[in-house]
Image (cartoon, rainbow, N blue to C red):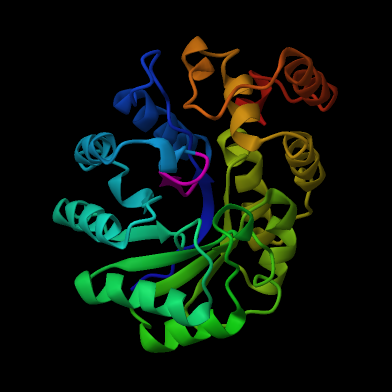
Amino acid sequence: MTKISGIFAATMSVINSDLSLNVEKTIDHAEKLIDQGCHGTAIFGSTGQSQLIPISEKIDLLNKLSKSKYKDKHLIGTGLNSLGETINFMKVARSINFKKFLIMPPAYYKYGDIEVIEFYTRIIESIPDCEIILYNFEKLCGYKFSMECVEELVKKFPDQIVGVKDSSYNLFENLKLKNFSIFPGSELKLLKGLELGCSGIITATCNVTAAISRKVYDDFYSEKKQSVNQKLCDVRRVFDKYNLISGLHSFFSHEDVIYKNILPPLSLLNKIDEKDLLNNLKELDFSNKSYLAA
């Protein structure tokens, strides 16, 4: 088993005007990010509006993605609260040879480590031939992984629990496990994480920072002077002022109006915030055109 590492974008979903998923453009968007420097993407993560997209549309995308030359570079997010639906969705994905999954514990209900271990145990007992990156994001699901919980899951399932995306930032500095991937969820943590032995990042804003995130990563391993990390962090801080999904769709809508479509109850930035976002990026010399060559 090869350890998962690198720069991963939590890629956006492209939505049609009738609020259906545009499968072709969603795949195209994800694979352009790989061309720009990402080692891979996380499909149907939080940024991809996964909780709001029908399972039938997700399966339609997986069927088409399975024929892609970049098939093995994608992590598949489940984005489902139901254990049964999570297992069924993963079975479909496995049937077309997707193996790596990003799975957040269910939202809404309150629970602790014991219940979380049981949740992942049931998944792995049903689908033992899988690799799971845990998704630690208390802000969205209401639960925050403890180090003890992660350690217990890895001890119990060393071949299946292979990493964690840490968007609660309570793990990446201190969790140390052999052959285990740790991905902070922000570019602000990329360089520090690499210095601490982390594997890279999985982030929303890699939809726009793919090239410069990759340069920070490559320069670290080449032991070169960091020349763009400050710019990378500045761009992330601009987007952090807003809801990331709203900000990204507003940003990309200036490249293609289809990005104006977003699933309710999410929305685009209001005009004042959109103008502020674009002006702040312009001050950083980071525009719709410049990010491709950054």
Q: Can residue 220 be seen in this view?
A: yes
Q: Is residue 45 magenta?
A: yes
What x and y, as percent, mark residue 97? 19, 55
Residue at left 49%, top 27%? 264
Extreme-left residue of the structure: 95
Q: In the rendered picture of this protein, how many numbered marks are placed on residues?
A: 0
What x and y, as percent, mark residue 113? 52, 79
Eyeballing the image, is 54 above or below 146?
above
Q: Can residue 160 be seen in this view?
A: no
Compare residues 143 and 36 and report the one nearer the observer: 143
68 sits left or right of 140 in the view: left
The magenta span reads 38-47
Eyeballing the image, is 95 above or below 244?
below
225 sits left or right of 73 in the view: right
Quadrant showing the C terminus: top right
66 sits left or right of 205 in the view: left
100 sits left or right of 135 in the view: left
Q: Does the magenta stretch include residue 44?
A: yes
What x and y, as percent, mark residue 23? 30, 28
Eyeballing the image, is 44 above or below 136?
above
What x and y, as percent, mark residue 186? 67, 51
Eyeballing the image, is 143 above or below 205?
below
Quadrant showing the N terminus: bottom left
Characterize the magenta stretch by its predominant secondary structure: loop
Residue at left 41%, top 43%? 44
Extreme-right residue of the structure: 283
Residue at left 47%, top 87%? 152
